[in-house]
Each structure stands twice: as structure tokens, then as C-alpha cells.
Image: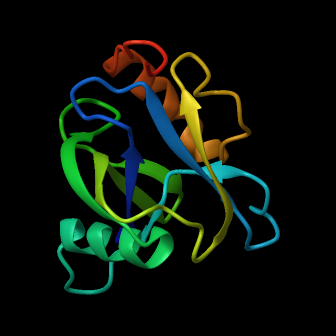
């Protein structure tokens, strides 16, 4: 079975010492509106997933990022199931240029402090990612 591939970023304030995680609130489609997700989008046919992620973050948030490690459900480079026909690859990322703004598909962005990463209603498929991030990343506490 062929899957549609989606790429996304877990944007943190610092790749080496993360304290904040960015969440983006969906504005559409209606069944997803009001739920939070990791920004990103679909990989176009023939497009490299990393290039697609950079393109999507530029279009959706107006930012350029430095990518960190890819985060997979099994730690072996696997992808996250979103629907029966859609899979997601996700990377840690840090903004290196631009001020993030909800330009497409979102109506709000929020920096979630360490220990409060589950304080918003995530899309059901992203909940497992948040749990995995909490296990992988030991936040250093609130920013100074």
C-alpha cells in the first residue's frame, strides 16, 4: 500500500537545551479546527522530504529552521501513522530566521513551556508524538 507522506517539525527554542515547544492551532478543515498540531505538510511527488519540510515551514509560518534529529515512534527512523493512508516524518527544529506567524492553515501559534506540552488539545495522531518527545527530551525548565 502506498502512503501519502507528510512532514512536520517539533519546533523548540533551542535544539541543545529545549525549554519551549511550538504548537500550531488548526483553522481548517472544520473537523480539525481548534486542535493543535506540529507545523508541516504534504510532500509533493518527487520532492525530498527535508526540502518539503523547509518549504512548508516557510509557507505556513514564514520561518527558516535548522533541523535536529528525526523523531520516530520506534527510534529506528519509522514514520508516524496519521490515518490509514497517511504517514508523517517529524524532525526537531529551531528557528534561525523569521518571526513565526500563522500564515496558512492555522489561526494561532503558542510556545508551550516545559512540563506543559500537553496543555492544549492536540490532534489525536500528534498525542503520541508529544509523549515520545517528553521521553526523548529532558527539558531544562523555564527560560531565564
Q: How are the residues colored?
A: rainbow
Name the residue: 29% across, 30% down.
74
Up the image or down, 108 lies above or below 130; here it is below
**Residue 122 in which image quadrant:** top right
Q: Which of 42 and 56 is in front in this view?
A: 56
- Residue shown at 42% from the left, 24% from the top: 19
Residue 6: x and y in percent read: 40, 65
Quick check: 80 above or below 104?
A: above
Farthest bottom residue in view: 45
Query: Split into 4 quadrants, where in the image is the N terminus?
Result: bottom left
Q: Look at the picture and state if 69 lies above or below 119.
A: below
Q: Residue furthest front?
A: 144
- The location of residue 50, given as percent across then percent down, is 20, 65
Horizontal side of 12 relative to 100 (left or right) equals left
- State which quarter of the image contains the C terminus: top left
Q: In this view, does 71 lie above or below 55?
A: above
- x and y percentages locating residue 127 in the rendered image: 58, 35
Can residue 42 be spotted in the picture?
A: no
Going 74% across and 73% down the picture, which residue do you hit? 29
**Nearer to the camera, 13 or 72:** 13
Residue 75 in percent (x, y) is at: 23, 30
Can residue 16 be seen in the rendering of this structure?
yes
Q: Quadrant of residue 42?
A: bottom left
Q: How many labels does the image show?
A: 0
Q: Is residue 23 left or right of residue 92?
A: right
Amino acid at each position: 500500500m502506498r502512503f501519502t507522506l507528510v512532514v512536520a517539525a517539533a519546533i523548540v527554542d533551542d535544539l541543545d537545551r529545549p525549554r519551549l515547544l511550538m504548537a500550531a492551532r488548526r483553522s481548517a478543515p472544520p473537523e480539525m479546527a481548534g486542535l493543535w498540531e506540529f507545523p508541516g505538510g504534504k510532500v509533493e511527488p518527487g520532492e525530498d522530504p527535508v526540502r518539503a519540510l523547509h518549504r512548508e515551514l516557510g509557507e505556513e509560518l514564514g520561518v527558516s529552521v535548522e533541523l535536529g534529529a528525526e523523531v520516530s515512534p520506534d527510534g529506528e527512523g519509522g514514520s508516524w501513522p496519521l490515518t490509514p493512508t497517511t504517514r508523517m516524518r517529524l524532525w526537531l527544529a529551531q528557528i534561525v530566521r523569521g518571526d513565526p506567524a500563522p500564515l496558512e492553515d492555522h489561526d494561532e501559534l503558542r510556545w508551550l513551556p516545559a512540563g506543559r506540552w500537553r496543555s492544549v488539545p492536540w490532534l489525536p495522531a500528534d498525542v503520541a508524538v508529544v509523549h515520545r518527545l517528553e521521553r526523548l527530551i529532558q527539558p531544562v525548565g523555564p527560560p531565564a
